[in-house]
């Protein structure tokens, strides 16, 4: 083994914490994973235990190194990627969080957001940050912690407390409290970061009543943030890359040219389009975000989210019992020529972009006595293609350019039938990478770029390898006819009118 040809990616996600060791070539040397407990104190609230996150980080790093037969001295660098928007505040002196982490899914500040919207604040938020005024993001979570944890606001104003998303918390812990930093991509998800100035925005801080003293410094995504404490992993390791999970996947999928899109299909779906050096304010309620920032130069992205992707297949399996295993869905979908006119709109928790209709509810339309479970399974998979086309249409309208390529990852991307229908429904070539752990790979690549393991983003792009390419084969008229049926089905479920 050549020393320092390896990179450790620390992927702290919503449901698990993982460590993956990559060789410079992009090959996975070893991995370890721990599930993360979900805490639901009240309806609509979601929290994580910061100490569990920290102990799991140390455990998976040690396990991955042992499984790879490596020591920390063999690592050229470490990259961090994280669940975005999840919010922590901790004591600077002790490193102890003042409360559980408030997860991005948490809705406890919905009323605060409604009040600010009624005051007309969303326009300011949208223009400065590219985001919507929603509990999803960090700002109202920070304000809630400061206002509801005894002594928090006073401690913050005296400089005793620090705010961070999960990346910042881990950087603080990994460096033994020496570092309070974040990266530009994570900062752009807080509702406090001005996309144009690339700085924390004073007017937004005043709007949310947040003292600037608790904020981390903001750095590029490839940056030497610090070194791990030697006793944690066995040696000091340079922490040289950081990005929120979806932006890390954009890098891991090598979407470095404007118009390239990565789409991650997990429980839901997150699609990001590289839009180049200027932030594009969406007219279709997509999010404008930092894609990545390297050497001070920002590449922006448009982001759209689908609330229900792989979860629709899980529902067919667990809720209706139509499948024993999720991976049976491909064969079942292929067993019928079409859906028999059936559309499944999986608006179980409302519709995401570009509709943003939280009141919509799921519907199955077009049922006849001839409908079988195979038709329903096929309709669930087809819905992922139609929802993706919804996003791509909105992105094209905002960006003034059609998508050039769709690169997919996530659990549903392993389904060949679903990938083929994605190509048919969008009319795009769909590429699936050989290494599907694109989020962790992106964090590793950013670290490798900073420590000199790669000389440029062109070298990063060469690490990406294709597993399979899917070309559209469906006639364009038929594609548009099917999509028109989808739009009609969506109109039926808007506001629960199925």
Image (cartoon, rainbow, N blue to C red):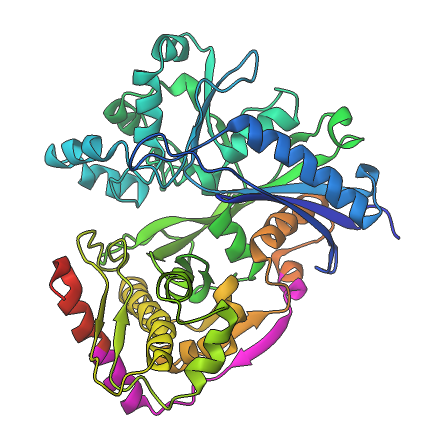
Q: Is residue 22 left or right of residue 468?
A: right
Q: Residue at point 37% right, 75% down?
A: 377
Q: Residue at point 28% right, 52% down?
A: 281
Where residue 466 appears, as percent x and y from the top left, is 61, 73
Residue 420 appears anywhere in the view: no
Indicate the quadrant containing the C terminus: top left, top right, bottom left or bottom right: bottom left
- Identify whether 256 is placed above or below 86: below
Q: How many marks?
A: 0
Residue placed furthest toward the right: 1
- Identify whether 324 is placed above or below 221: below
Along the viewing direction, whichever of 68 and 408 lies nearer the viewer: 68
Where residue 333 appears, as percent x and y from the top left, is 42, 81
Q: Residue at point 83% right, 38% down?
A: 73
Where residue 285 appears, as percent x and y from the top left, is 24, 54
Where residue 451 appears, as percent x and y from the top left, is 71, 43
Asked if residue 394 lies in the magenta stretch, the reply is no
Q: Is residue 272 left or right of residue 459?
A: left
Residue 132 appears anywhere in the view: yes
Q: Residue at point 53% right, 39% down?
A: 36
- Identify whether 120 is placed above or below 25: above
Give the magenta part as a residue range: 461-485
Q: Is residue 456 left or right of residue 152?
A: right
Asked if residue 465 lies in the magenta stretch, the reply is yes
- Identify whether 203 is placed above or below 151: below
Along the viewing direction, whichever of 177 and 331 lies nearer the viewer: 331
Q: Quadrant of residue 85?
A: top left
């Amino acid at each position: 083994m050549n020393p320092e040809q390896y990179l450790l990616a620390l992927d702290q996600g919503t449901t698990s914490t993982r460590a993956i060791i990559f060789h410079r070539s992009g090959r996975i040397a070893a991995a370890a994973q721990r599930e993360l407990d979900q805490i639901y104190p009240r309806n609509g609230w979601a929290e994580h235990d910061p100490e569990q996150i920290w102990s799991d980080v140390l455990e998976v790093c040690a396990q991955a190194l042992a499984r790879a037969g490596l020591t920390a001295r063999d690592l050229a660098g470490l990259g961090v990627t994280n669940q975005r928007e999840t919010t922590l505040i901790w004591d600077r002196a002790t490193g102890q969080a003042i409360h559980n982490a408030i997860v991005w899914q948490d809705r406890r500040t919905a009323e605060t957001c409604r009040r600010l919207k009624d005051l007309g604040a969303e326009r300011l938020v949208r223009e400065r940050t590219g985001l919507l005024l929603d509990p999803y993001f960090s700002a109202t979570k920070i304000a809630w912690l400061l206002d509801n944890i005894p002594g928090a606001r006073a401690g913050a104003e005296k400089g005793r407390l620090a705010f961070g998303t999960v990346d910042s918390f881990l950087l603080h812990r990994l460096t033994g409290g020496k570092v309070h930093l974040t990266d530009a991509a994570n900062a752009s998800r807080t509702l406090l970061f001005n996309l144009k100035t690339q700085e924390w925005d004073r007017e937004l801080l005043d709007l949310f009543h947040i003292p600037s003293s608790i904020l981390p410094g903001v750095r590029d995504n490839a940056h030497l943030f610090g070194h791990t404490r030697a006793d944690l992993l066995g040696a000091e390791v340079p922490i040289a890359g950081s990005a929120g999970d979806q932006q890390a996947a954009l890098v891991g999928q090598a979407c470095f040219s404007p118009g390239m899109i990565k789409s991650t299909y997990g429980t839901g779906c997150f699609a990001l389009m590289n839009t180049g050096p200027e932030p594009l304010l969406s007219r279709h309620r997509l999010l404008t975000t930092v894609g990545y920032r390297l050497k001070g130069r920002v590449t922006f992205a448009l982001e759209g989210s689908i609330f229900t992707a792989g979860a629709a297949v899980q529902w067919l399996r667990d809720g209706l019992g139509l499948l024993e295993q999720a991976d049976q869905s491909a064969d079942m979908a292929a067993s019928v020529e079409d859906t028999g006119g059936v559309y499944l709109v999986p608006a179980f928790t409302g519709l995401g972009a570009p509709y943003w209709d939280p009141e919509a509810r799921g519907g199955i339309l077009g049922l006849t006595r001839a409908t079988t479970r195979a038709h329903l399974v096929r309709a669930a998979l087809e819905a992922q293609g139609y929802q993706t086309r919804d996003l791509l249409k909105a992105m094209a309208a905002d960006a003034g350019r059609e998508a050039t390529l769709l690169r997919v990852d996530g659990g549903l991307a392993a389904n060949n039938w679903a990938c083929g229908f994605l190509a048919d429904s969008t009319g795009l070539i769909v590429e699936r990478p050989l290494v599907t752990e694109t989020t962790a790979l992106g964090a590793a690549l950013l670290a490798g770029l900073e420590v000199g393991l790669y000389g440029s983003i062109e070298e990063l792009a060469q690490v990406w390898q294709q597993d399979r390419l899917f070309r559209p084969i469906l006639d364009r008229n038929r594609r548009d006819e099917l999509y028109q049926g989808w739009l009609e089905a969506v109109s039926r479920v808007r506001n629960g009118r199925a």
